[in-house]
């Protein structure tokens, strides 16, 4: 079946602009995660959605970052007033809840802030 | 605070050799330790995982060794192949199924 998809694959923006990144999880996966991967570094947790529970926003680096999820489907990560340090690959992962551990990652969106 | 430390940052091994990557953690609440493999331009993909009640897990050429008392775990890639050239990340899971990742190891297998 289809895996996790993300769009756009690449995004170049100017400093100060807002950007929206989209994630389509695997159908039926109730858990959804966003991570940030800076060049040559590991993944940093940003936010976690699980069903109808309040999202875990503990990894968001500033109030310029926000994310939404509609039910158990699409999620969007919004970065307002982008800064050059926001340049990174933003990865989305989904997981079939109910005792399963594996997170399945999308290909990521490479964000470049000029 | 970096909760999972991974070493080395890069590794070059000859085809047929053994690649060894080490990780150390601090948080004793971690209860699941996966390894992910990432190729350029792709998202990470789960390779193999272990729980702390097991000291070793093997899947094909990939083996995780886990030392709970030392709070360390490692990935061994036996009979390394050029197709194994990738970046490998260890991770650890705490509450909420959030993963904390190590910094990654870039492995290059020379033919």
Image: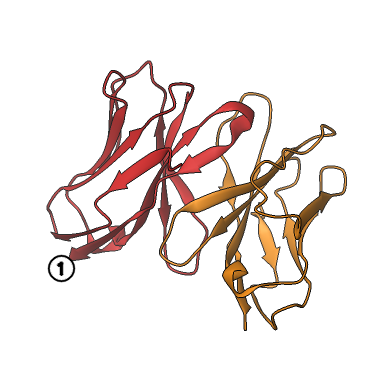
Chain colours: A orange, B red
Residue at image point 39% right, 29% down: B26
Query: Looking at the picture, how far across and down is residue B6, in whole percent?
Result: 32, 45
Classify A61 as above or below A52.
below
Residue A15: quarter of image:
bottom right
Give the residue at mark 1: B111
Residue B4: quarter of image:
top left
Query: Looking at the picture, how far across and down is residue B44, in whole percent?
Result: 49, 54
Residue at image point 56% right, 32% down: A101
Callout 1: helix, strand or loop? loop
Query: Looking at the picture, how far across and down is residue A46, in whole percent?
Result: 64, 49
Residue at image point 31% right, 39% down: B23
Classify A67 as above or below A6.
above
Q: How many discs appear? A: 1
- Describe residue A102's horizontal placement relative to residue B34 as left or right: right
Q: Please state the chain letter of the residue tagged with numbered disc 1 in the rendered image.
A: B
Would residue B1 be visible to someone looking at this image? yes
Would residue B63 be visible to someone looking at this image? no
For the residue pair A58 and A47, the one nearer the viewer reads as A58
Q: Residues within 10 Å of mark 1 (few under 14, many from 20)?
A: few
- Describe residue A30's horizontal placement relative to residue A11 as left or right: right
Classify A44 as above or below A64.
above
Query: Looking at the picture, how far across and down is residue B64, in whole percent?
Result: 29, 33
């Amino acid at each position: 079946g289809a895996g996790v998809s993300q769009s756009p694959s690449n995004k170049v923006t100017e400093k100060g602009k807002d950007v929206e990144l989209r994630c389509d999880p695997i159908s039926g996966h109730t858990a959804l995660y966003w991570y940030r991967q800076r060049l040559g570094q590991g993944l940093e947790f940003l936010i976690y959605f699980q069903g109808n529970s309040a999202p875990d926003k503990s990894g968001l680096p500033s109030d310029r970052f926000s994310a939404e999820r509609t039910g158990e489907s699409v999620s969007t990560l919004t970065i307002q007033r982008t800064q050059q340090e926001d340049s990174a690959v933003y990865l989305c992962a989904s997981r079939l809840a109910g005792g399963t551990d594996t997170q399945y990652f999308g290909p990521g969106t490479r964000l470049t802030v000029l | 605070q970096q909760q999972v430390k991974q070493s080395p940052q890069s590794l070059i091994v000859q085809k047929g050799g053994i690649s060894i990557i080490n990780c150390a953690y601090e948080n004793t609440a971690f209860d699941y330790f996966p390894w992910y493999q990432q190729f350029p331009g792709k998202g990470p993909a789960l390779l193999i995982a272990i729980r702390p009640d097991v000291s070793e897990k093997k899947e094909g050429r990939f083996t995780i060794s886990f030392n709970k008392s030392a709070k360390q775990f490692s990935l061994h890639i036996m009979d390394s192949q050029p197709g194994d050239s990738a970046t490998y990340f260890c991770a650890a899971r705490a509450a909420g199924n959030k993963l904390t990742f190590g910094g990654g190891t870039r492995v290059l297998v020379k033919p």
